[in-house]
Image (cartoon, rainbow, N blue to C red):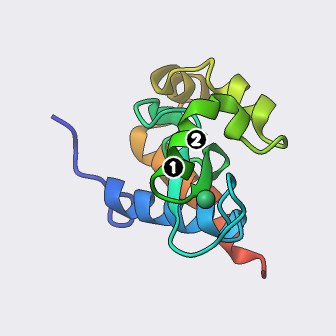
Amino acid sequence: MKKPQAPGLSDSTLSALWRKVVLHVGRNTCVICGGGGYLECHHIIKRRYKLLLWNWRNGVPVHKGDCHATADRLGMSAAGPAWYSYLLEMAKWTKKEYLMKNDWSESEWRAGVKNDLSAELGGGA
Ligand SMILES: [Zn+2]
């Protein structure tokens, strides 16, 4: 069985932090219609693809309903142009392969994911 994760590295903690960073980087603006208000976070590369599950470059803010459905239909085109190539490159790896390549444990990977997210919230704006 899986070992419990260290405090601060649980699925729910990383999911909440991911959402916060996606909204922050996306300036609380829906990528489909440009509006604000309550926004969901859309995974450009599907959630089942674990390597990018909590990568903020793989998320964009959208309104619930039509905007989210439109983002789903757009697929990779919903990604910001800055991250399109990055996401395609990362998508070549399974999470297992990527961790092996870097010689990371699950906890080390999660800590890295958290640092990457936290770094985005650190700088002003
Ligand atoms: Zn919208």
Cβ of mark 1 under 8 A from ligand 1: yes
Residue type for callout 1: Asp
Residue drawn at x 39%, y 58% is: 9
Question: Which residue in the protein does label 1 denote?
Answer: 66
- Report the residue that reaches farthest toward the bottom: 124
Quadrant of the image where one finds ligand 1: bottom right
Nearest the viewer among 35 and 125 is 35
Q: Does the residue at mark 2 contact the one at mark 1 (Cβ under 8 Å)?
A: yes
- Report the residue that reaches farthest toward the right: 82
Using the rendered view, name the quadrant where residue 106 is placed: top left
Left or right of 65: which side holds 56?
right
Nearest the viewer among 33 and 9 is 33
Residue type for callout 2: Thr
Residue drawn at x 52%, y 29% is: 99
Using the rendered view, name the quadrant where residue 120 is placed: bottom right
Left or right of 105: which side holds 112?
right
Q: Position of residue 46 (x, y in %)?
A: 48, 33
Position above or below: 65 against 83: below
Position above or below: 97 against 22: above
Position above or below: 12 against 96: below
Which part of the image, by quadrant, shows the N terminus? top left
Q: Position of residue 110 (x, y in %)?
A: 47, 49
Q: Position of residue 29 (x, y in %)?
A: 68, 67
- Report the residue that reaches farthest toward the front: 66
Q: Position of residue 79 (x, y in %)?
A: 71, 41
Residue drawn at x 63%, y 52% is: 60
Identify the element where label 1 is drawn. helix
Residue drawn at x 83%, y 40% is: 81
For residue 70, the mark is: 2
Q: How packed is label 1: few (under 14 Cα within 10 Å), some, or many (20 or more)? A: few
